[in-house]
């Protein structure tokens, strides 16, 4: 059968993949790009797909290759949001720079801190975030900034440092954490928060790759294939989010957070 035919993608160390596996990776990349562009959390789809479908891939290779696909998608959604929403770059720029630096450090620490010790804490935080968001239907409906001037930018930088370090260290749900932080802490509506989150998320992906590329962990052929699909998903997702507005993004956010809670809880229970 055609799906069973194998090819060797460049930059994978001679790894052979069937056309069926490549098709599944393309589908996962597209779906991840769409989810990431709307509210973040595309890694919920893309990273497990790499681990499940690519034979003999290590966890570090999966994390690094996932970042290649993600950065291609976030660059596309960032440009789309910038053109259509015009996010405040005076907030995005310092937040993104802080997140980039923190992501490099987080990636370097990834091998020294046990992920299993942090997952239960993340699950509790996500549950509280979901309850808080669901209990406040007007949250993120309109932009009502908490602070102005240096206090606003200082809070943005602090959020960038914290979430950037988390993305480099672990990663699942980074985009969702960015969105809810921009909404609940800084006071943005969901639509401009998603636009700002994509710019910052691009920086965190880039920061992680600054560590992973010299480490030699990226399977470039797979990353580019997944990334190309991610680009299309991100473009469609960003346009849909802009068209449907903050209410649509809020619902998508709750769905993604619920999925992330289930996934991380399963990992803890099963010992993965």
Image: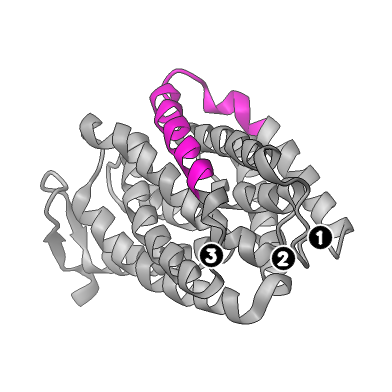
Q: Earlier in the sequence, mark 2 or mark 1?
A: 1
Q: Secondary structure at mark 2?
A: helix
Cβ atoms at labels 3 and 2 below 8 Å apart: no
Residue matched to label 1: 139
Q: CA distance from mark 3 to mark 1?
A: 20 Å
Q: Residue at x 24, y 37 (%)?
A: 213
Q: Secondary structure at mark 3?
A: helix
Residue 261 can be seen, yes or no: yes
Cβ atoms at labels 2 and 1 below 8 Å apart: yes
Image quarter in which the N terminus is found? bottom left
Residue extending furthest toward the top: 112
- For the residue carrying disc 2, how many other residues have a C-alpha within 10 Å: few (<14), some (14-19), or many (20+)? many
* The one of 81 and 121 positioned closer to us in this rendering: 81
Q: Residue at x 34, y 68 (%)?
A: 229
Residue matched to label 3: 35
Which marked residue is nearer to the observer: mark 3 or mark 1?
Answer: 1
Q: Residue at x 24, y 72 (%)?
A: 3
Magenta segment includes 112 = yes
Q: Earlier in the sequence, mark 3 or mark 1?
A: 3
Residue range highlighted in magenta = 93-120
Q: Where is residue 214 shown, x and y percent of the image?
A: 21, 32
* The one of 79 and 118 positioned closer to us in this rendering: 79
Q: Is residue 205 left or right of residue 131?
A: left
Q: CA distance from mark 2 to mark 1?
A: 9 Å
Residue 42 can be seen, yes or no: no
Q: Secondary structure at mark 1?
A: loop
Residue matched to label 2: 250
Work out whether 236 lies above or below 132. Answer: below
Q: CA distance from mark 3 to mark 2?
A: 13 Å
- For the residue carrying disc 1, how many other residues have a C-alpha within 10 Å: few (<14), some (14-19), or many (20+)? many
Magenta segment includes 169 = no
Which marked residue is nearer to the observer: mark 2 or mark 1?
Answer: 1
């Amino acid at each position: 059968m055609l799906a069973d035919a194998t090819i060797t993608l460049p930059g994978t160390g001679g790894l052979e993949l069937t056309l069926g596996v490549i098709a599944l990776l393309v589908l996962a990349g597209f779906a991840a790009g769409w989810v990431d562009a709307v509210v973040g959390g595309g890694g919920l789809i893309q990273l497990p797909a790499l681990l499940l479908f690519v034979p003999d891939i290590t966890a570090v290779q999966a994390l690094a290759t996932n970042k290649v696909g993600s950065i291609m998608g976030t660059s596309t959604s960032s440009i789309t949001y910038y053109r259509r929403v015009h996010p405040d770059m005076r907030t995005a720029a310092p937040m993104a720079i802080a997140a980039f630096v923190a992501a490099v450090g987080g990636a370097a620490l990834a091998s020294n801190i046990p992920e299993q010790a942090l997952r239960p804490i993340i699950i509790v935080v996500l549950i509280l975030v979901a309850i808080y968001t669901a209990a406040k239907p007007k949250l993120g409906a309109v932009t009502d900034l908490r602070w102005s001037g240096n206090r606003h930018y200082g809070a943005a930088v602090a959020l960038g440092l914290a979430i950037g370090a988390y993305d480099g260290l672990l990663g699942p749900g980074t985009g969702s954490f960015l969105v809810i932080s921009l909404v609940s802490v800084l006071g943005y509506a969901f639509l401009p928060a998603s636009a700002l989150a994509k710019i910052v998320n691009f920086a965190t992906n880039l920061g992680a790759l600054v560590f992973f590329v010299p480490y030699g962990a990226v399977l470039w052929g797979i990353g580019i294939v997944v990334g190309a699909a991610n680009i299309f998903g991100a473009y469609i997702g960003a346009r849909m989010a802009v068209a449907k507005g903050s209410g649509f993004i809020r619902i998508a956010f709750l769905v993604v957070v619920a999925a992330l809670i289930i996934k991380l809880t399963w990992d803890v229970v099963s010992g993965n």
